[in-house]
Amino acid sequence: MRSSDDRVYLASVDHLRAVAAVLVVLYHGCQLLSARIEGRRFVPATDWLYSANPAATLVFEGHTGVALFMVLSGFIFTVGAYGRPIRYRRFLTNRLLRIYPLYLAVAVLGLATQVSMPTFQDLVRILTFATPTQPYGGVFWTLCVEMQFYLVFPLLVRLLAERGPGALLRLLAAVSLLRALVWLSSPAPEPHTASLYLGLAGRIDQFLLGMLAAWVYVHHGDRLRARWLPPLAAAVALGLLWSFNQVHGFVSDSPLKLAWSAAGGCRGRWRGSGR
Protein backbone atom coordinates (compact mmCIF):
# COMPACT_ATOMS: atom_id res chain seq x y z
CA MET A 1 0.00 0.00 0.00
CA ARG A 2 1.17 3.54 -0.82
CA SER A 3 -0.54 6.63 0.47
CA SER A 4 -0.42 10.39 0.09
CA ASP A 5 -2.30 13.31 1.54
CA ASP A 6 -5.26 12.91 -0.82
CA ARG A 7 -5.45 9.25 -1.71
CA VAL A 8 -4.59 5.69 -0.77
CA TYR A 9 -3.24 3.25 -3.34
CA LEU A 10 -3.64 -0.48 -2.76
CA ALA A 11 -1.73 -2.54 -5.30
CA SER A 12 -3.80 -5.64 -4.55
CA VAL A 13 -6.95 -3.78 -5.60
CA ASP A 14 -5.46 -3.18 -9.04
CA HIS A 15 -4.65 -6.88 -9.23
CA LEU A 16 -8.27 -7.72 -8.47
CA ARG A 17 -9.44 -5.20 -11.05
CA ALA A 18 -7.29 -6.99 -13.60
CA VAL A 19 -8.87 -10.31 -12.60
CA ALA A 20 -12.35 -8.81 -12.96
CA ALA A 21 -11.52 -7.35 -16.38
CA VAL A 22 -10.13 -10.66 -17.65
CA LEU A 23 -13.22 -12.51 -16.40
CA VAL A 24 -15.55 -10.15 -18.25
CA VAL A 25 -13.52 -10.41 -21.46
CA LEU A 26 -13.44 -14.22 -21.28
CA TYR A 27 -17.16 -14.34 -20.55
CA HIS A 28 -18.02 -12.18 -23.57
CA GLY A 29 -15.67 -14.20 -25.74
CA CYS A 30 -17.11 -17.58 -24.76
CA GLN A 31 -20.77 -16.70 -24.37
CA LEU A 32 -21.45 -13.86 -26.76
CA LEU A 33 -18.79 -13.85 -29.47
CA SER A 34 -18.96 -17.60 -30.01
CA ALA A 35 -22.58 -17.25 -31.12
CA ARG A 36 -21.68 -14.33 -33.40
CA ILE A 37 -18.93 -16.35 -35.01
CA GLU A 38 -21.54 -18.98 -35.82
CA GLY A 39 -23.62 -16.29 -37.50
CA ARG A 40 -26.42 -15.95 -34.95
CA ARG A 41 -27.39 -13.87 -31.97
CA PHE A 42 -26.67 -15.10 -28.48
CA VAL A 43 -29.83 -16.24 -26.68
CA PRO A 44 -29.21 -16.79 -22.94
CA ALA A 45 -32.12 -19.21 -22.51
CA THR A 46 -30.69 -21.66 -25.05
CA ASP A 47 -27.03 -20.73 -25.56
CA TRP A 48 -25.78 -20.36 -21.98
CA LEU A 49 -22.82 -22.63 -21.30
CA TYR A 50 -22.68 -25.02 -18.34
CA SER A 51 -19.99 -27.30 -17.00
CA ALA A 52 -19.25 -29.52 -14.02
CA ASN A 53 -15.70 -28.16 -14.14
CA PRO A 54 -15.37 -25.24 -11.65
CA ALA A 55 -12.61 -23.64 -13.75
CA ALA A 56 -14.94 -23.54 -16.76
CA THR A 57 -17.81 -22.06 -14.76
CA LEU A 58 -15.46 -19.30 -13.64
CA VAL A 59 -15.39 -18.22 -17.29
CA PHE A 60 -19.01 -18.99 -18.14
CA GLU A 61 -20.18 -16.84 -15.21
CA GLY A 62 -17.48 -14.23 -15.77
CA HIS A 63 -20.15 -11.50 -15.91
CA THR A 64 -19.79 -11.46 -12.14
CA GLY A 65 -16.55 -9.59 -12.67
CA VAL A 66 -18.84 -6.54 -12.88
CA ALA A 67 -19.97 -7.21 -9.31
CA LEU A 68 -16.33 -7.45 -8.26
CA PHE A 69 -15.64 -4.05 -9.85
CA MET A 70 -18.49 -2.49 -7.90
CA VAL A 71 -17.41 -4.04 -4.61
CA LEU A 72 -13.89 -2.73 -5.22
CA SER A 73 -15.26 0.75 -5.93
CA GLY A 74 -17.03 0.84 -2.59
CA PHE A 75 -13.94 -0.55 -0.89
CA ILE A 76 -11.25 1.73 -2.27
CA PHE A 77 -13.29 4.93 -2.00
CA THR A 78 -14.11 4.15 1.62
CA VAL A 79 -10.53 3.28 2.52
CA GLY A 80 -9.41 6.63 1.11
CA ALA A 81 -12.21 8.75 2.56
CA TYR A 82 -13.17 7.11 5.86
CA GLY A 83 -12.89 9.53 8.76
CA ARG A 84 -12.05 12.46 6.49
CA PRO A 85 -14.32 15.29 5.38
CA ILE A 86 -15.46 15.14 1.76
CA ARG A 87 -16.18 18.28 -0.20
CA TYR A 88 -19.10 17.15 -2.30
CA ARG A 89 -18.59 19.53 -5.22
CA ARG A 90 -14.87 18.85 -5.41
CA PHE A 91 -15.45 15.10 -5.16
CA LEU A 92 -17.93 15.06 -8.07
CA THR A 93 -15.81 17.45 -10.12
CA ASN A 94 -12.80 15.17 -9.78
CA ARG A 95 -14.91 12.16 -10.79
CA LEU A 96 -16.23 13.97 -13.87
CA LEU A 97 -12.79 15.19 -14.93
CA ARG A 98 -11.48 11.66 -14.67
CA ILE A 99 -14.32 9.97 -16.55
CA TYR A 100 -16.34 12.38 -18.68
CA PRO A 101 -13.87 13.39 -21.44
CA LEU A 102 -13.03 9.82 -22.50
CA TYR A 103 -16.65 8.77 -22.01
CA LEU A 104 -17.85 11.46 -24.42
CA ALA A 105 -15.11 10.63 -26.93
CA VAL A 106 -16.18 6.98 -27.04
CA ALA A 107 -19.86 7.97 -27.18
CA VAL A 108 -19.26 10.28 -30.16
CA LEU A 109 -17.27 7.56 -31.90
CA GLY A 110 -20.11 5.12 -31.35
CA LEU A 111 -22.71 7.55 -32.68
CA ALA A 112 -20.56 8.19 -35.74
CA THR A 113 -20.75 4.51 -36.67
CA GLN A 114 -24.55 4.59 -36.85
CA VAL A 115 -26.44 5.10 -40.09
CA SER A 116 -29.42 6.81 -38.47
CA MET A 117 -29.15 10.09 -36.61
CA PRO A 118 -29.45 9.93 -32.80
CA THR A 119 -32.63 11.30 -31.29
CA PHE A 120 -32.70 14.12 -28.79
CA GLN A 121 -33.52 11.59 -26.09
CA ASP A 122 -30.45 9.54 -27.04
CA LEU A 123 -28.22 12.60 -26.65
CA VAL A 124 -29.75 13.54 -23.29
CA ARG A 125 -29.30 10.00 -21.96
CA ILE A 126 -25.66 9.97 -22.98
CA LEU A 127 -24.87 13.43 -21.65
CA THR A 128 -26.49 12.74 -18.27
CA PHE A 129 -25.11 9.24 -17.70
CA ALA A 130 -28.57 7.73 -17.92
CA THR A 131 -28.41 4.13 -19.09
CA PRO A 132 -27.84 4.75 -22.81
CA THR A 133 -29.26 3.03 -25.81
CA GLN A 134 -27.10 1.56 -28.52
CA PRO A 135 -24.43 1.99 -29.63
CA TYR A 136 -22.30 0.93 -26.68
CA GLY A 137 -25.31 0.69 -24.38
CA GLY A 138 -24.08 -2.73 -23.35
CA VAL A 139 -20.78 -1.18 -22.26
CA PHE A 140 -21.85 2.14 -20.76
CA TRP A 141 -24.39 0.80 -18.30
CA THR A 142 -21.76 -0.13 -15.70
CA LEU A 143 -20.27 3.36 -15.87
CA CYS A 144 -23.73 4.85 -15.41
CA VAL A 145 -24.24 2.78 -12.25
CA GLU A 146 -20.83 3.89 -10.96
CA MET A 147 -21.78 7.54 -11.46
CA GLN A 148 -25.02 7.00 -9.57
CA PHE A 149 -22.99 5.55 -6.71
CA TYR A 150 -20.65 8.56 -6.72
CA LEU A 151 -23.65 10.83 -6.19
CA VAL A 152 -24.54 9.14 -2.90
CA PHE A 153 -21.11 7.98 -1.71
CA PRO A 154 -20.27 11.07 0.41
CA LEU A 155 -23.52 10.59 2.33
CA LEU A 156 -22.92 6.86 2.76
CA VAL A 157 -19.35 7.21 4.01
CA ARG A 158 -20.43 9.90 6.47
CA LEU A 159 -23.18 7.58 7.67
CA LEU A 160 -20.62 4.81 8.14
CA ALA A 161 -18.22 7.07 10.05
CA GLU A 162 -20.84 8.55 12.37
CA ARG A 163 -23.13 5.57 12.99
CA GLY A 164 -20.93 2.58 12.27
CA PRO A 165 -21.43 -0.48 10.07
CA GLY A 166 -24.85 -1.17 11.57
CA ALA A 167 -26.29 1.72 9.55
CA LEU A 168 -25.10 0.19 6.27
CA LEU A 169 -26.31 -3.25 7.33
CA ARG A 170 -29.77 -1.83 7.91
CA LEU A 171 -29.63 -0.19 4.50
CA LEU A 172 -28.65 -3.55 3.01
CA ALA A 173 -31.68 -5.12 4.65
CA ALA A 174 -33.92 -2.39 3.24
CA VAL A 175 -32.55 -2.93 -0.27
CA SER A 176 -33.15 -6.68 0.02
CA LEU A 177 -36.71 -6.07 1.14
CA LEU A 178 -37.30 -3.67 -1.76
CA ARG A 179 -36.01 -6.22 -4.25
CA ALA A 180 -38.27 -8.89 -2.79
CA LEU A 181 -41.30 -6.60 -3.00
CA VAL A 182 -40.54 -5.84 -6.64
CA TRP A 183 -40.35 -9.58 -7.32
CA LEU A 184 -43.63 -10.33 -5.54
CA SER A 185 -45.48 -7.48 -7.26
CA SER A 186 -44.39 -8.41 -10.77
CA PRO A 187 -47.24 -9.72 -12.93
CA ALA A 188 -44.91 -10.68 -15.76
CA PRO A 189 -43.27 -14.11 -16.23
CA GLU A 190 -39.92 -12.34 -16.09
CA PRO A 191 -39.96 -10.31 -12.85
CA HIS A 192 -39.13 -6.63 -12.96
CA THR A 193 -36.03 -7.40 -10.89
CA ALA A 194 -34.35 -8.06 -14.25
CA SER A 195 -34.36 -4.31 -14.86
CA LEU A 196 -32.68 -3.74 -11.49
CA TYR A 197 -29.62 -5.49 -12.91
CA LEU A 198 -28.78 -2.33 -14.88
CA GLY A 199 -29.33 0.28 -12.16
CA LEU A 200 -28.13 1.35 -8.74
CA ALA A 201 -31.24 -0.07 -7.06
CA GLY A 202 -30.10 -3.56 -8.00
CA ARG A 203 -26.39 -2.95 -7.44
CA ILE A 204 -26.19 -0.76 -4.33
CA ASP A 205 -25.73 -3.81 -2.10
CA GLN A 206 -22.46 -4.61 -3.87
CA PHE A 207 -21.12 -1.10 -3.21
CA LEU A 208 -22.29 -1.33 0.40
CA LEU A 209 -20.54 -4.66 0.88
CA GLY A 210 -17.36 -3.08 -0.44
CA MET A 211 -17.74 -0.22 2.04
CA LEU A 212 -18.30 -2.67 4.90
CA ALA A 213 -15.21 -4.61 3.82
CA ALA A 214 -13.27 -1.33 3.93
CA TRP A 215 -14.51 -0.69 7.48
CA VAL A 216 -13.26 -4.14 8.49
CA TYR A 217 -9.96 -3.46 6.73
CA VAL A 218 -9.47 -0.11 8.51
CA HIS A 219 -10.36 -1.41 11.97
CA HIS A 220 -9.23 -5.03 11.82
CA GLY A 221 -6.75 -5.15 8.96
CA ASP A 222 -4.11 -7.01 10.96
CA ARG A 223 -6.45 -9.97 11.37
CA LEU A 224 -6.76 -10.35 7.61
CA ARG A 225 -3.11 -11.23 7.01
CA ALA A 226 -3.46 -14.95 7.75
CA ARG A 227 -2.02 -17.08 4.96
CA TRP A 228 -5.03 -19.39 4.90
CA LEU A 229 -7.49 -16.59 4.14
CA PRO A 230 -6.73 -15.99 0.41
CA PRO A 231 -7.13 -19.65 -0.63
CA LEU A 232 -10.29 -19.93 1.47
CA ALA A 233 -11.71 -16.79 -0.13
CA ALA A 234 -10.88 -18.07 -3.62
CA ALA A 235 -12.47 -21.46 -2.86
CA VAL A 236 -15.68 -19.86 -1.56
CA ALA A 237 -15.89 -17.55 -4.59
CA LEU A 238 -15.36 -20.42 -7.02
CA GLY A 239 -17.88 -22.55 -5.16
CA LEU A 240 -20.53 -19.84 -5.42
CA LEU A 241 -19.97 -19.44 -9.15
CA TRP A 242 -20.05 -23.19 -9.74
CA SER A 243 -23.30 -23.53 -7.78
CA PHE A 244 -24.86 -20.62 -9.65
CA ASN A 245 -23.92 -22.19 -12.98
CA GLN A 246 -25.20 -25.65 -12.03
CA VAL A 247 -28.69 -24.39 -11.17
CA HIS A 248 -28.77 -22.31 -14.40
CA GLY A 249 -28.92 -19.22 -12.24
CA PHE A 250 -28.62 -16.48 -14.84
CA VAL A 251 -31.57 -17.68 -16.91
CA SER A 252 -33.54 -19.01 -13.95
CA ASP A 253 -36.62 -17.26 -12.58
CA SER A 254 -36.08 -18.72 -9.13
CA PRO A 255 -36.62 -16.41 -6.14
CA LEU A 256 -33.12 -17.40 -5.04
CA LYS A 257 -31.82 -14.91 -7.59
CA LEU A 258 -32.98 -12.18 -5.22
CA ALA A 259 -29.97 -13.00 -3.06
CA TRP A 260 -27.47 -13.43 -5.90
CA SER A 261 -26.58 -9.75 -6.23
CA ALA A 262 -25.49 -9.72 -2.59
CA ALA A 263 -23.84 -13.13 -2.95
CA GLY A 264 -21.86 -11.87 -5.93
CA GLY A 265 -20.84 -8.89 -3.85
CA CYS A 266 -19.76 -11.13 -0.99
CA ARG A 267 -17.66 -13.07 -3.48
CA GLY A 268 -15.83 -9.86 -4.36
CA ARG A 269 -15.54 -8.85 -0.72
CA TRP A 270 -13.99 -12.17 0.26
CA ARG A 271 -11.48 -11.88 -2.53
CA GLY A 272 -10.60 -8.33 -1.56
CA SER A 273 -10.28 -9.03 2.15
CA GLY A 274 -8.04 -11.97 1.47
CA ARG A 275 -5.41 -9.97 -0.34
Image (cartoon, grey):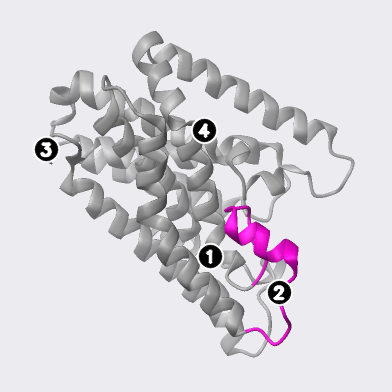
Residue under numbered circle 2: 118
* Residue type beneath disc 4: Asp
- Is residue 121 a member of the stretch shown in magenta? yes
- Contact between labelled residues 4 and 3, with CB atoms less than 8 Å apart: no
- Name the one closer to the observer, 89 or 125: 89
Dot 4: few (<14), some (14–19), or many (≥20) neighbours within 10 Å?
many
* Element on which disc 1 rests: helix
- Contact between labelled residues 3 and 2, with CB atoms less than 8 Å apart: no
* Element on which disc 3 rests: loop
Residue 26 located left or right of residue 181:
left
User: Which mark is nearer the camera, 3 or 1?
Assistant: 3
User: Which mark is nearer the camera, 3 or 4?
Assistant: 3
In the drawing, what numbered circle is on residue 205? Answer: 4
User: Which badge, 3 or 4, is on the more N-terminal residue?
Assistant: 3
* Residue 173 picture quarter: top right
Question: Residue sitting at 60 percent across and 77 percent down?
Answer: 111
In the drawing, what numbered circle is on residue 130? Answer: none
Q: What segment is highlighted magenta in the picture? A: 114-134
In the drawing, what numbered circle is on residue 139? Answer: 1
User: Which badge, 3 or 1, is on the more N-terminal residue?
Assistant: 3
Q: Residue furthest top?
A: 163
User: Which mark is nearer the camera, 1 or 2?
Assistant: 2
- Contact between labelled residues 2 and 1, with CB atoms less than 8 Å apart: no
Q: Position of residue 34 (x, y in %)?
A: 54, 81
* Element on which disc 2 rests: loop
User: Which badge, 1 or 2, is on the more N-terminal residue?
Assistant: 2
In the drawing, what numbered circle is on residue 4? Answer: 3
Judge whether 214 appears above or below 150 on screen.
above
Examine the residues drawn in magenta and state their main secondary structure: loop
Dot 1: few (<14), some (14–19), or many (≥20) neighbours within 10 Å?
few
Q: Position of residue 22 (x, y in %)?
A: 35, 65
* Element on which disc 4 rests: helix
